[in-house]
Amino acid sequence: MTVEQEKVDIAYCGLCCNDCFNHKGEIADLARDLRKKLREEKFDRAAGGLSKYFKEFGDYEKCYATLGAMVRLRCGKMCHEGGGNPGCKIRKCCAKKGLPGCWECSEAEACDKHDFLKPIHGEENVDNLRKIKKAGLDKFSDTVSAEHLKD
């Protein structure tokens, strides 16, 4: 696969959709498959018995519910195609300002709309915004594409 064949979408916030576990869907698939196997094995009964010996199995229902939430961590489209959080304030702001992404906005670095990303992504999107602003979107996308080809 060449760099040209690798489609990379940079979200409005600067994150790369191709790196997102929601977009990849692997975690959602694994959680779905594990829930199916647990149902087939009627593991809820086993967990009840095992909880006498291992206290953690007393939380089996929470674990199963968490796996259910993980199944829903799926995003079939990339950000610019309408994927991700439909109520994303960043996407709405860029659309309102007519910008392809925050890298075009002079207020991006101080913008608090990015704060919700920090617990999961740290400063990755802000770092990407700086790189895009400096090198340009095409060059940044080419660099990201080349990195994906190595994986």
Image (spheres, grey):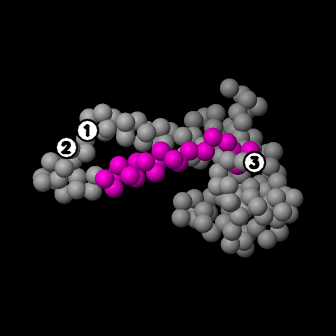
Of the two numbered discs 2 and 3 in the rendering, the one whose residue sits closer to the viewer: 2
Q: Based on the displayed image, in which of its 4 quarters is residue 40 positioned?
A: top left
Which class describes the residues within 10 Å of circle 1: few (<14), some (14-19), or many (20+)? few
Q: Which residues are magenta?
A: 61-81
Give the residue number, with chain letter if any, for mark 3: 80
Q: How many numbered markers are drawn?
A: 3
Q: SS of the residue at dot 1?
A: loop
Q: Residue at x 40, y 53 (%)?
A: 66
Q: Residue at x 37, y 36 (%)?
A: 36
Residue 58 place in picture, x, y as percent = 22, 56
Instruction: Give me the disc on residue 46.
Output: 2
Relative depth, front residue between 91 and 10: 91
C-alpha gap between disc 1 and disc 2: 7 Å
Give the residue number, with chain letter if any, for mark 1: 42
Q: SS of the residue at dot 2?
A: helix
Please give left or right for residue 41 compared with residue 73 in the image.
left
Relative depth, front residue between 67 and 15: 67
Residue 8 place in picture, x, y as percent = 71, 41
